[in-house]
């Protein structure tokens, strides 16, 4: 099995707290990332980075499916001040700005367009942009450079908890998807009497229910697991879960934060994914324990 090369990402807590401003840099990359909550906007805009040409993300709303606005500006500081008084951006809770001394506004226009395209394809967020700029104006060589720049953006944002650009479909060749997906075990959740059959894989730290899996169409108990009920409803409204004849079918691969979140949405009730999901009649929990037991500890080698 091929092993991917590691990447060194340098994170810096600018004000010494995990909830404050965070900068991120990648070795041999000209880009610079600055992220923080909207409540820290004054300190955010007082720094030098937002005064440069760059791209930015305004993020907020449901953590499982956030609302995202993707923009660019020759002077990000000025643009963010304008957004702060825009009532259509009331969802905005977190800000992320990416700048570089090597890019111009022509480059940021290209990056903005491609990022909107990628975010919509990933379908892990509600993209609030109504339009996106054309990318064909940028010379071919510059487009190639910006695609490399984008690869670094897609790598570094999930580290900051911004995973809405992550392309999770197993058929996608994105660099964000680990190699050898075919070798990953397939977990199943089956309820023969109810006609429920679902399959899932673990992909890059997420539990991904595969296209074609079945789920119940309506939530069963509104007194428990309200967040999962909302998630179930959002998947239906977005078309990821298609309702027909009393059942819901996953129309594409859908990532979940845990096996329990996936099981709860499928069974339309609060569920323990560690016991509901199985592989060869072994529960997910027992399978995980077995994998951990295979890891040699310091005491084992003495």
Image (tube, rainbow, N blue to C red):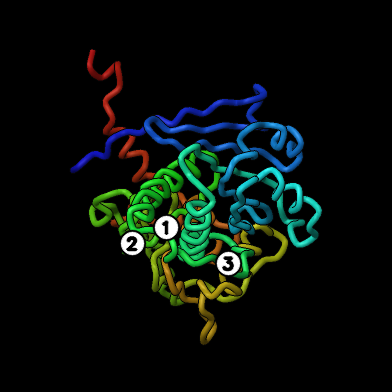
SS class of the residue under badge 1? loop
Which residue: 41% across, 46% down?
149
Q: Where is residue 282 shown, x and y percent of the image?
A: 33, 52
Q: Position of residue 47 (x, y in %)?
A: 67, 31
Position of residue 192 in the picture relative to residue 239 (left or right)? left
> Please, what secondary structure does the residue beneath circle 3 have?
loop
Circle 2 is placed at which residue position? Answer: 172
Q: Note whether residue 263 is visible.
A: no
Q: Mark 3 = which residue?
A: 268
Q: Tell us which disc is closer to us: 1 or 3.
A: 1
Residue in the picture at 28% in, 30% down: 295
Cα gap from disc 3 to disc 2, whole angstroms: 29 Å
Q: Position of residue 208 (x, y in %)?
A: 42, 58
- Whichever of callouts 1 and 3 sits on the residue coming sooner in the sequence is 1
User: Of residues 266 and 114, which is closer to you in this image?
Assistant: 114
In the visual, does 196 lie left or right of 88?
left
Q: Earlier in the sequence, mark 2 or mark 1?
A: 1
Determine which residue is flagged by label 1. 167
């Amino acid at each position: 099995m091929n092993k991917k090369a590691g990447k060194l990402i340098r994170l810096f807590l600018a004000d010494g707290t995990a909830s404050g401003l965070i900068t991120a840099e990648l070795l041999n990359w000209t880009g610079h990332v600055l992220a923080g909550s909207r409540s820290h906007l004054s300190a955010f805009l007082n720094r030098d980075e937002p005064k440069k040409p760059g791209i930015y993300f305004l993020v907020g709303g449901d953590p499982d499916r956030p609302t995202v606005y993707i923009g660019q500006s020759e002077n990000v500081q000025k643009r963010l001040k304008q957004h702060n008084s825009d009532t259509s951006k009331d969802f905005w809770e977190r800000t992320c700005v990416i700048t570089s001394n090597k890019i111009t506004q022509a480059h940021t226009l290209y990056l903005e367009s491609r990022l909107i395209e990628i975010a919509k394809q990933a379908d892990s967020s509600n993209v609030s942009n109504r339009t996106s700029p054309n990318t064909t104006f940028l010379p071919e060589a510059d487009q190639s450079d910006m695609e490399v720049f984008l690869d670094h953006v897609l790598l570094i944002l999930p580290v900051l908890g911004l995973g809405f650009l992550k392309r999770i479909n197993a058929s996608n060749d994105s660099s964000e998807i680990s190699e050898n997906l075919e070798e990953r075990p397939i977990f199943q959740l089956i309820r023969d009497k109810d006609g429920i059959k679902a399959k899932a894989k673990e992909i890059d730290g997420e539990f991904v229910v595969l296209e074609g899996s079945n789920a119940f169409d309506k939530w069963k108990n509104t007194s428990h697991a309200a967040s999962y009920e909302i998630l179930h409803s959002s998947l239906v409204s977005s078309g990821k879960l298609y309702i027909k004849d009393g059942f819901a079918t996953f129309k594409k691969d859908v990532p979940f934060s845990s096996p329990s979140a996936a099981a709860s949405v499928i069974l339309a009730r609060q569920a323990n994914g560690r016991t509901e999901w199985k592989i060869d009649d072994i529960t997910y929990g027992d399978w995980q324990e077995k994998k951990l037991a295979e890891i040699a500890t310091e005491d084992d080698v003495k």
